Image (spheres, rainbow, N blue to C red):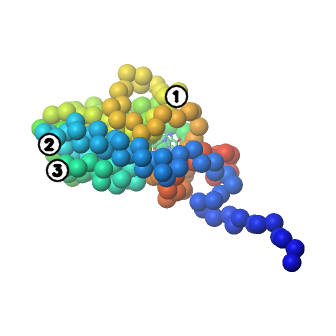
Amino acid sequence: MSAEPTKIAMTEFNNSNLETLLTEEQIADRIAELGAQITREYADKDLVLVGVLKGSCVFMADLMRAIDLTLTIDFMSVSSYKDGTKTTGDVEILKDLSKPIREKDVIIVEDIVDTGLTLTRLVEILDSRGANSIKIASFLDKPEPRIKTELKIDYTGFVIENKFVVGYGLDAAGRYRNLPFIAIVKNPAEI
Ligand code: IMP
Ligand code: MG
């Protein structure tokens, strides 16, 4: 029998327009570290994790299971990016928190900080509601396009270069949130 070259089927996870940047294992290891750090630092606090929908949903699910403390979670949805890769600069609240955060120790859980416009505005909004403390946990930090350079990210998963990435909750026009890893989109025109 002659050996046929192995054909690898093209699937959503194995897609020729994607180049893996962070593997599932790298992600899991880092989140265990972040969870342990937050567990140490919030032992005597009244912690609420506020996830920014939709991008943070996967990070939120993993991070909260790495924090061995009494905590609650809530979600907000804001629009800063329209479909595609361009920022608008505006932040509009599409879904607000379900409970007040007065006197609470809030960690905002975000997928990625890019220009920083979204989070800067979100911190202002939540600060005006009388939280005891507000910190930021962002799975990814893309510092190069930052406009709000004064924005402090307290817990960062990974710092990455200025490329458009998808997976682990992050999307390109709604697609690829379900990838269990982070990938660079090689040709954004082909999404
Ligand atoms: P910022 O206001 O520019 O910091 O926007 C942050 C938001 O833009 C994130 O929460 C994402 O929804 C989106 N975003 C920024 N960079 C990327 C990327 O590389 N892939 C997917 N979404 C991104
Ligand atoms: Mg987002």
Numbered badge on residue 70: 3
The residue under label 2 is 46
Residue 98 percent location from the top left of the image: 21, 52
Q: Residues within 10 Å of mark 1 (few under 14, many from 20)?
A: few
Residue at far right of view: 2
Q: Of circles 2 and 1, which is in front?
A: 2
Residue marked by disc 1: 145
Please determine whether, in this image, residue 119 is positioned above or below residue 23. Answer: above
Q: Disc 1 or 3, which lies upstream in sequence? A: 3
Q: Amino acid at mark 3?
A: Thr
Residue at the (75%, 66%) spot, across then down:
7
Q: Residue at x 69, y 55 (%)?
A: 16
- Crowding at dot 3, Cα within 10 Å, few <14 / some 14-19 / many 20+, comes out as few
Quarter holding the N terminus is: bottom right
Q: Please name whichever residue, 147 or 47, is drawn nearer the observer in this view of the structure.
A: 47
Residue 153 screen position, x and y as percent: 36, 31
- Ligand 1 under 8 Å from disc 1 Cβ: yes
Separation of marks 1 and 3 at Cα, in angstroms: 36 Å
Q: Secondary structure at mark 3?
A: loop
Judging from the image, what secondary structure is the residue with disc 2 in? loop
Q: CA distance from mark 2 to mark 1?
A: 34 Å
Residue at (13% x, 39% y) in the render: 44
- Please give the label number shown on residue 69: none
Q: In this rendering, is residue 77 above or below 154? A: below
Residue 58 image offset from top left, x and y in percent: 40, 54
